[in-house]
Amino acid sequence: MNKIILIGNLGKDPDGTYTANGTAVTKFTLAVSRRAKTTEGEAKVETDWFSIITWNKLAEVCNQYLRKGQKVYIEGRLSMRTYTDKLGVERMVVEVIANEMEMLSPKPKAEEDNDEIDALLAELEKQ
C-alpha cells in the first residue's frame, strides 16, 4: 500500500494550470513541522517540505481556495520520478499525488464562500 497523510502549512500560493488536453493540475509545497530534541537535550523544531500535486476537481478547488500559510490535511500517495535538468544532469524527485484535502485553517468570512467550498468538497467525496 502506498499512502501518505500530512498536516502542514502551504509554503506559497498554489500554482494551477491545465494540461494540453484540458485537465486541471495544481502544485504547491507543504511545510510539515515536528518538535525534536538535540543531542544536548535542547528542544527544536524540524520542518520537512513536500511537493504536492492535485488533479481534476481537487486541483481546481486547491487553486481557488488555498493560500500561503493555510493549514491543510493532505492524503495521497508518494510518487518518484526522474528527469534531466537544463545542465543534462539526471535528477530524482519525490512528490505527493494528493487525492484528498481538507482545509484546517478558519474558513473564509463570506458565508457564500463557505457553502460553495462545502459543496465542492462533498462532490469530490462522491467520486
Image (tube, rainbow, N blue to C red):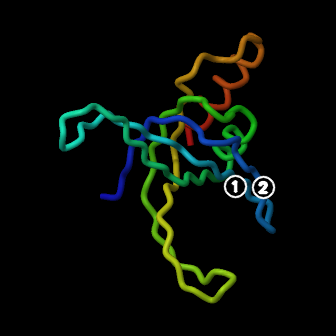
Instruction: Indicate which disc, 2 or 1, sits on the residue closer to the N terminus.
Output: 2
Task: Say whether residue 77 is left or right of residue 123.
Answer: left
Badge 2 element: strand
Q: CA distance from mark 2 to mark 1?
A: 6 Å
**How many badges with numbers are in the image?**
2
Depth check, front residue: 74 or 40 = 40
Provide residue 86's location: percent of width, then percent of height.
69, 82
Residue at image point 54% right, 84% down: 90
Query: Please, is residue 36 above or below residue 89 in the view?
Result: above
Badge 1 element: strand
Mark 1 — residue?
A: 25
Q: Quadrant of the N terminus?
A: bottom left
Residue at image point 72% right, 41% down: 63
Among the 4 quarters of the image, the one containing residue 89: bottom right
Query: Please, is residue 102 above or below residue 109 in the view?
Result: below
Mark 2 — residue?
A: 17
Provide residue 60's location: percent of width, then percent of height.
72, 43
Depth check, front residue: 119 or 99 = 99
Crowd rating for badge 2 (residues with CA inside 10 Å; few <14, some 14–19, many 20+): some
Task: Say whether residue 99 is left or right of residue 20.
Answer: left
Residue type, label 1: Val
Residue at image point 75% right, 36% down: 64
Residue at image point 51% right, 41% down: 100
Crowd rating for badge 1 (residues with CA inside 10 Å; few <14, some 14–19, many 20+): many
Mark drawn on residue 81: none
